[in-house]
Each structure stands twice: as structure tokens, then as C-alpha cells.
Amino acid sequence: MDEARLNRARRRSVAQTAGAIGVVLLLVGALMFVLTSRQEGRELDTQLTQVLAMAEDVDDPPPGQVLARQPAGAAATETTRGASPELVRVLHDAVGRRPGRYDTSAGDDRPVRVLVRQRADGSRWAIAADLAPLRQRQGQLAVALLVAELAGLAGALVAAALLARRAVAPLATALTLQRRFVADASHELRTPLTVLHTRAQLLARRARGQPADRLTDQLDQLVADTRALGEVVEDLLVSAAAEHRPLPDTEVDLAEVAREVVASMSAYAQGRAVELRAEAAGPAPVRGARTALRRALTALVDNAVGHVPDGGHVTVTVAGRNGRVVAEVADDGVGLDPAETDRLFERFAHGTAGTGRRFGLGLALVQHVTRAHGGTVEVAGAPGRGATFTLLLPPA
């Protein structure tokens, strides 16, 4: 729906921009045609005036022109030899008129321009010029301007399309970011809500006929899970406000974070008959954001539990290795196809086995968090032999 609206807005912008440019081109072309036609008309008038001023007889006018002279006090009119009867008639009529210029027809729709002058000796002179060449040039000019306007309109359409695409691009990006944030939020909230739901069910069953003090540990875990859910929401909101803002430069014990994730996800794993455990020889300090690192490990544990059958195992191991802090999430589940590792961390991609999300938003977020902390993610596994996801982070 949003894409359709953006496409309509882009097409409307293209039509409006091209229409405005087309109108401007039309006005400019019309103005050029009028100015050019007037200029050629004035040049023709100047030429006719010069011919009348310099002519001594009617025998040798310029090509396309015919002269006529009526001496002072005479009734007869001299006309250039070879002139058509229509032109002779036009010139005989012209010498009887007042001096000036006018356009008329010499028969067969043959337009001519006539200029009449009276000299100081009283003789009256007239010249007729064929307007066909002028009309032909004006027609050619009109065609040339029309072709230029069509080409300009085509260019305007292309330019308008590019400008509209550039103008709409920020809106499309904003919509994409909005959808991404909604997808991230949905994915991130799914696991904590599932854990809370499972723990609440366990509490409801255990609360029947048992003293309240035996539920203290479960209630403390429920409070911790609720706090973790609030941290996830806060982290997502901060990411939406400034995705590229530097992470907090605080020291975080990754081993402690792993134990918290395992404790939080244990009820969820038990509900799926999966053994979930954490192994850490000692503290593993790194620098970064505690909530973001917990988010990454939770996503990896969620993926692992979702791909392990009943009675399977998921182990979270944190240790130091070759000057790096390493966090491994290993399972003995359905494994993965090595051919799919190239698209393993693509957004919205999904695997072909298991109920968790070996592919998709979770792993995309894991990669984003790991890179933001200056680390890398490694993947190992084979179909039917489980999978191991390893985070390698610089130590604090």
C-alpha cells in the first residue's frame, strides 16, 4: 500500500513537472516564432524600401520582385516585363493608392507584399514581392521549434522522473526504516514475552497448594525477565532514534551476561525439553552495551533452542582465546546447510528446518551488535550435527 502511494506520488510529480516545463517550452517557442517572423518581415520591408529608392526603371528588379512606375501627370503605368497578369493588376491598383505597405493576393493563393512610394518628382512607384519564400521559412521554423519542444519535453520527462525518484527516495527510506524497526521490535519482544508466559504458567501451576516462600525464586526471575523486557524496549527505542550513535563505553562481564541469559531462558528451554547450561571459567570483561550484548546472546540461544529436538542440549560457553573474548552457543540439533551460510545473516531470510529462526532478524541483529562492538561472528555446523555460533570480541 505504501509503495503504491509512493509510486502514485512519483508519477504525479513527474506529470506536474513535465507539464510545467512543457508549458514553458511552448511559450518560449511561440515567442521565438513571433520575434523571428517579425524580424524577417522587417528585413523584407527594408529591402523593398531600398529597391524603390535606388530604382531608375522597372526593367531589372531583384529576383521574386516586380516594379511598377507611374510618371507624374501620366495615366499609363509601366510594369516589369514578364510579370503575370495578376501581379500587373495588383501593381496598377497599388500606384493609385496612398504610399504605404500592405499584403494581398496575386491569385491562386499567391501572397505578395506591396510597397508604394511617391518620389519628389511626383512619380509614383510600387514594388511587389512574393511572400512564398518567407512563408516557407516560417513554416520550417515552426516545424523546427515543434521538434525542439518535443525533444525538450522528452528530456523534461526524464529529468522529472529522476528528480521525482530522488525526492521520493527519502520517503521510501523512512518507510523501510519504519518497517525494519517494527520487525526488530516484534522479533526482540517475542522471546522475552514467551519466557514470561512460560514462567507465569509454571508459577500458576506451582502456586496451587504450596507456601508462598517456595515461589520466591520464580518471582525474582519473573521480575528480572520483566526488567530485561523493559531494557529490550528501551534499547530498540534508542536504536530507532539514533541507529549509528556510539555504544556506551562501559565494562561488561560477558560471562555474567551469559549466565543471566541462560537463567532467563531456562524455563523456556525446559518447556521444550531442552537442557540449557552456561560454562565460564571466570570473568570475561569487554567494553560496550550490556543490553545489546544480552540481546545478541538471547537471540542465539533462542535460535539454538528452536532447532534442538526433545532431549537435546544447548551450551553457552564464554572464555578467552588468542587475546579475544569468545562466546559460543552450541547445539546438537538439526544443524545447518553450509551452502546457506552466505545468506545466514540476511534480514528476513529463513531457514528450512526447526521452529526457531536460524535465519532472519535475530541473526541480523546479532551481527549488527557484534560489529558495533568491534567483533565478528563465526558459524560452524552441518546437517544433522548441530551448529555453533561464535562471537569474538576485543577484551576490555
Image (tube, helix red, strand yellow):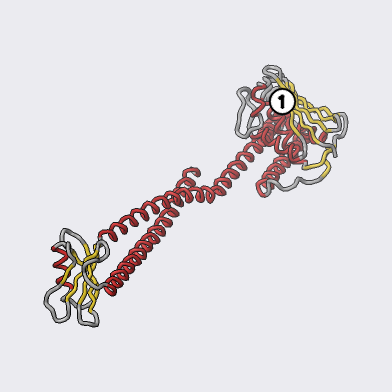
The amino acid type of the residue labelled 1 equals Gln
Residue sitting nearer the eye, 163 or 221: 163
Residue sitting nearer the eye, 65 or 348: 65
Q: Position of residue 126 (x, y in %)?
A: 21, 72
Q: Position of residue 207 (x, y in %)?
A: 71, 32
Callout 1: few (<14), some (14-19), or many (20+) C-alpha neighbours within 10 Å? some
Q: Which residue is mark 1?
A: 270
Q: Residue at x 76, y 29 (%)?
A: 390
Q: Position of residue 110 (x, y in %)?
A: 20, 60
Q: Is residue 95 above or below residue 244?
A: below
- The image quadrant where one finds the C terminus is top right
Residue 338 seen by the camera? yes
Name the side, left or right, on which 83 lies relative to 36: left
Name the side, left or right, on which 298 lies relative to 21: right
Residue ranking furthest to the right? 282
Q: Residue at x 55, y 47 (%)?
A: 169
Residue ranking furthest to the left? 75
Residue ranking furthest to the top? 384
Residue 211 seen by the camera? no
Element at label 1: helix
The quarter of the displayed image where residue 379 is located: top right
Q: What count of labels does the image hold? A: 1
Residue sitting nearer the eye, 385 or 30: 30
The quarter of the displayed image where residue 140 is located: bottom left
Q: Is residue 7 above or below residue 356?
A: below
Residue sitting nearer the eye, 53 or 5: 53
The quarter of the displayed image where residue 388 is located: top right
Name the side, left or right, on which 262 lies relative to 281: left
